Image (cartoon, grey):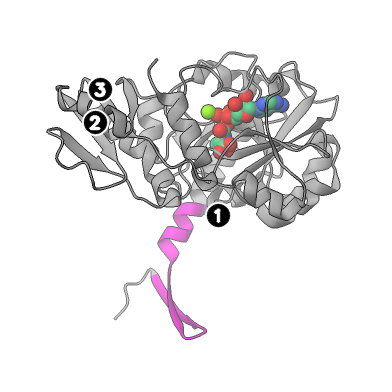
Amino acid sequence: MLPNNLAVCEYKSVIIYFDFNLAKKMKKAILTAINILKGGGLVAIPTETVYGLAADAKNDKAIEKVFFTKKRPINHPLIVHVGDSNQLAIWASSIPDSAFLLIKEFWPGPLTLLLKKNPSISKLITAEENTIALRMPNHPLTLKLLKEFNGALVAPSANRFGKLSPTSKEAVIEELGEDLYILDGGICNVGIESTILDLTDATMPCILRPGIISAETIEKVLGIPIYHDKKNKPHVSGSHSSHYAPNTPLYLFGEEEIEKLKNENDIAIVSHLHSHSFLPHDMYYLPTNPLLYARALYATLRLLDKKNYKALWIEKVPEDKEWDGIRDRLKRAITI
Ligand code: TXA
Ligand code: MG
């Protein structure tokens, strides 16, 4: 006998249970979020990468609150999140064919495209840049929210500036407190922020921030080389020396540091291999698969941050392209 709130149906010989109560709750949560956003307030939204701190992209007063809440410098531009690629024309002044190819392949998904901006866009979103960053997140709740909101949302990661991005509702609360309305979408599937690709010169696409969608994967779709940005892009947060960082000092180790590590006290070791168990320290293991590693990384650092270790030592990750995004975040999180 099924509980009252569950319906059951069969689809291609798979039995599917449908929870009416949950569906009702989600609908109500989305309505609440829309009301807050339309009223100029902020809502933490789940995405497949990390939780975002969302505001109506057409409301400057609401956008100011985003900077204030995150304590983010005003010269760091924001990503505009859309639920429909037809909205691109509102934000971008020109959309190269390569953008359409990538959108077809990766949206909704963890790829942000940097395009030439429409001149009428608020400077609060784009700072002094003449570009706009756009993405369609792949999370069912946020996609539904975007469609029903019928507009676009700016959404930087829902953390205090420079700190670890949150990958769960609990982590958002740790970062920004209890007062913020959070649309609870569970644990983020990807776990690190989106890849940012600069397409403002379509002949020379550049990765501004590596992520789970690698340069190699993008190259396969576009059929031209992808550059790793060497240009002057001062305002990409994460290019600061300390970013995506826990409060506990964090260092990376390879084989060469093993001897030194033996003499340290009160540290935790984070490894993705199982070959260091001889070390006389608390050991934490992350997966060897980069997708699973990325999903667990911030949650693990957040957990270890609460344990009052003197330092966290993380094993260097492989040089392979599919580890680019993770290597980038670790590099930025280390204590210099
Ligand atoms: O996965 C993600 O991208 C998450 C989720 C919430 O969507 N968002 C996110 O936003 O990571 P945020 O603000 O934490 O990081 C966005 C990065 C920043 O480094 C910002 O400086 C850069 O994108 N950015 C945004 N607009 C830009 C622009 N017009 N030119 C150069 N960089 C830009
Ligand atoms: Mg961020």
Q: Disc 3 on helix, strand or loop?
A: strand
- For mark 2, what is the residue? 258
Residue pictured at 55% horizontal, 41% vertical: 211
Residue at 48 percent of width and 47 percent of height: 190
Q: Amino acid at mark 2?
A: Ile
On screen, residue 218 above or below 250: below
Q: Residue furthest bottom?
A: 13
Residue at the extreme left: 280
Q: Are marks 3 and 1 in contact (CB under 8 Å)?
A: no
The residue singled out by tag 1 in the image is 140
Ligand 1 quadrant assignment: top right
Report whether 177 appears left or right of 140.
Answer: left
In the rendered image, residue 285, in percent from the top left (x then y), is placed at 27, 44
Circle nearer the N terminus (2, 3): 2
In space, the residues marked 1 and 2 are separated at their CA atoms by 44 Å
Q: Are marks 2 and 3 in contact (CB under 8 Å)?
A: no
What percent of the width, then of the height, locates residue 200? 80, 33
Kind of element beneath mark 1 = helix
Disc nearer the start of the sequence (1/2):
1
Identify which residue, 313 or 149, lies in the foreground.
313
Figure check: 34 above or below 40: below
